[in-house]
Amino acid sequence: MDEAGAIFKVLVLNEISPKGLGRLPPQRYVCGRDIACPDAVLVRSADMHAMTVPPSVRAIARAGAGTNNIPVAAMSARGVPVFNAPGANANAVKELVLAGMLMAARNLARALRFVDALAGQSDDVEKAVEGGKSAFAGFELQGQSLGIVGLGKVGSLVADAAIKLGMDVLGFDPEITVDAAWSLPSQVRRAASVAEVLRGGRFVTLHVPLLPATRDLVNADNLSLMPRGGVLLNFSRQGVVNEAAALAALESGQLGAYVCDFPSPALLGHERVICLPHLGASTCEAEVNCAVMVADQLRDFLENGHISHAVNFPSIRMSRESAFRVAIANANVPNMLGQISTAMAKAGLNIHNMVNHSRGEMAYTLVDVDSAVRDALLADLAAINGVLSVRYLPRLD
Ligand SMILES: NC(=O)C1=CN([C@@H]2O[C@H](COP(=O)(O)OP(=O)(O)OC[C@H]3O[C@@H](n4cnc5c(N)ncnc54)[C@H](O)[C@@H]3O)[C@@H](O)[C@H]2O)C=CC1
Ligand SMILES: O=C(O)CCC(=O)C(=O)O
């Protein structure tokens, strides 16, 4: 379908798995990199702070976990939900964290560089290998201590895998969800602070979102708490670790290795830094899982107004019993429902069903009415003080 004939237009800012895009049927959706007046944006890591989000946009879907690349507060003020895919890439990250621990413990990055350097330099490779390998002798993960900061989707999987490898695991998460707490193995010891985790782990791995409160979470003051020669792993975001402090700790020997998924000029080429090119979620499985999850959420929002896994809106759904639905995002303040239903009554509409959920300062209302809605009512609703966005969603099939 061409752009002009589509019911919904989706601007795609990164490579998104075709299996996910395939969930948006071409009879209704046009998706692409160069779309004017999009209804929605599909994104992975593209920096949306650096762009002007078109006023036509009604939803943003992040095919992944972190939403720090999206101007969430500005979207909330416009009544635009930001969806993500909680857990959909967590196993991929967990496996890379295990690889990172093994790389550090067995000096694998340096060992690979040593072997690569033998190419063309030595006729007797076996002799060079046997003579050089002692420089890379490592230690085993079994019996080592691992501290985990952030026990959400990724952190709890890492905890489980580490316990299975025979590690002693200590975790900290001040806002752990009930689901995550249930999924943690009972052997995971509970820490009361980041400091306690750093003190207790020869390995420390970070699995928190980048927020003002988590920027520089690991810094010069608390790195000194780690056992000397410890290994810090950062698969969260670059800003969660103060890089200058990590480099200084490597220089002094306080840190044995820094493993991270976020290369920067200062880190490149350092002997004991293992930098991966933001590969945490880059597996076929995770890319499909994330894309399918957010495409389904986006479609259900665009067509039915339903919300699941938005980071700034409450979850909501209401079975469709009438063909005419209005979806309203509004400030969570008194008398909004009264004003909405009064405007509908004035327009002569009978409310068939209505549901309203709130989350913090945001509220969201779905109203099914018995007859078609005119543009004038939508304009009246949009003009109510506190209403952030209004959409009319007549049933499509
Ligand atoms: N390298 C990569 O490719 C990937 C990186 N990530 C990053 O990892 C982060 C975590 O991902 P998930 O586990 O899926 O998210 P999640 O939302 O399931 O878990 C995050 C956990 O961090 C906790 N938390 C927040 N502030 C904290 C603090 N100050 N101290 C301790 N815990 C705190 C939360 O309570 C929550 O349980 C994402 O926000 C993203 O930045 C996620 C997926 C892939
Ligand atoms: O889409 C990606 O590859 C990045 C994944 C990520 O960082 C996340 O899900 O937070």
Image (cartoon, rainbow, N blue to C red):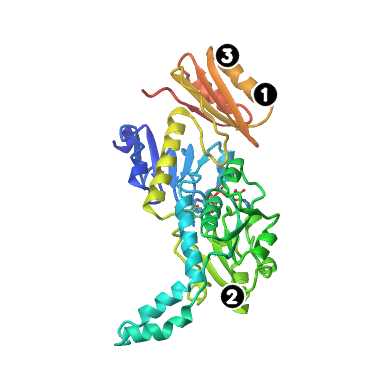
Q: Which mark is residue 335?
A: 1
Kindly report which numbered mark, 2 or 1, lies closer to the viewer in this rendering. 2
In the image, residue 299 lies at what x, y percent? Answer: 42, 34
Secondary element under disc 1, as helix, strand or loop, is loop
On the image, which quarter does residue 244 sit in? bottom right
For marks 2 and 1, the one nearer the N-term is 2
Tally of numbered tags = 3
Q: Position of residue 285 (x, y in %)?
A: 38, 49
The quadrant in which the C terminus is found is top left
State the image coordinates of residue 309 (x, y, percent, origin top left).
52, 39
Which element type, helix, strand or loop, lies under badge 2?
helix
| Visible residue check, residue 230 | yes
Q: Earlier in the sequence, mark 1 or mark 3?
A: 1
The residue at 36%/52% (across/down) is 284
Q: Nearer the viewer, residue 168 or 350?
A: 168
Q: Separation of disc 2 and disc 1 at Cα?
A: 58 Å
Residue located at (33% from left, 45% from top): 18
Label 3 Cα neighbours within 10 Å, binned few <14 / some 14-19 / many ≥20: few
Looking at the image, residue 259 sits to the left or right of residue 217; the answer is left
Q: Give the CA separation, mark 2 to mark 3.
A: 68 Å
Q: Residue at x 46, y 46 (%)?
A: 88
For marks 1 and 3, give the CA distance. 15 Å
Label 2 Cα crowd, 10 Å radius (few <14 / some 14-19 / many 20+)? many
Label 1 packing within 10 angstroms: few (<14), some (14-19), many (20+): few
Question: Which residue is disc 2 drawn over?
Answer: 250
**Taking 288 as reference, is 243 above or below it?**
below
